[in-house]
Amino acid sequence: MPKSKEYVSTDDSDEDVKPKKKQKLDVGSKEEKTSEKTNKESNVNGDTAWDLGSNRQVSVRDFKGKLYVDIREMYYDKDANLKPGKKGICLNMAQWRKLLSVMDDVDKVVKSKS
């Protein structure tokens, strides 16, 4: 009898034993989970988050009494829970206001180059 559970035989004949194919994690089901949610979400900590697509998210966090705007890539762990990744930026309120003040200029440059 094989030690691995990958090899399964339906009867005791001397037929070739074929390995059972491993199923890949269905990525489409993850995308459906995120698309079913509304754009604005709130988690256990009371943080508010907006989905940007492509596993990216903007959230407003309260950390040590100060507000931050966090723009971050997210990933799914082994239990299919959405977790924050390493790639991203966390802006304090002064930096966020500065970004908002130059947003129109940035948008004009993007439109002119596209």
Image (cartoon, rainbow, N blue to C red):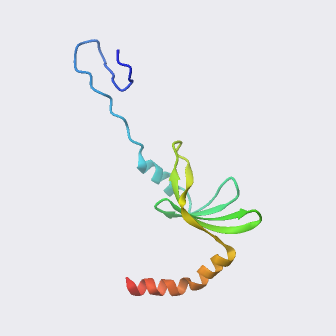
* Quadrant of residue 91 within the rendered picture: bottom right
Task: Tell me residue 95's x, y (percent).
Answer: 64, 77
Q: Where the C terminus falls, by quadrant?
A: bottom left
Q: Is residue 35 left or right of residue 6?
A: right
Task: Tell me residue 2's x, y (percent).
Answer: 35, 18
In this view, the residue in front, 74 or 90, is 90
Q: Residue furthest front?
A: 86
Identify whether 95 is placed above or below 7.
below
In this view, the residue in front, 9 or 5, is 5
Q: How many marks?
A: 0
Task: Tell me residue 92's x, y (percent).
Answer: 67, 72
* Quadrant of residue 41 within the rendered picture: bottom right
Identify whether 14 is placed above or below 112.
above
Residue ID at (49%, 83%): 107
Residue ID at (33%, 29%): 20
Residue ID at (55%, 64%): 88
Q: Where the N terminus falls, by quadrant?
A: top left
Q: Residue furthest right?
A: 65
Residue ID at (72%, 62%): 63
Q: Residue furthest top?
A: 12
Task: Tell me residue 76's x, y (percent).
Answer: 51, 50
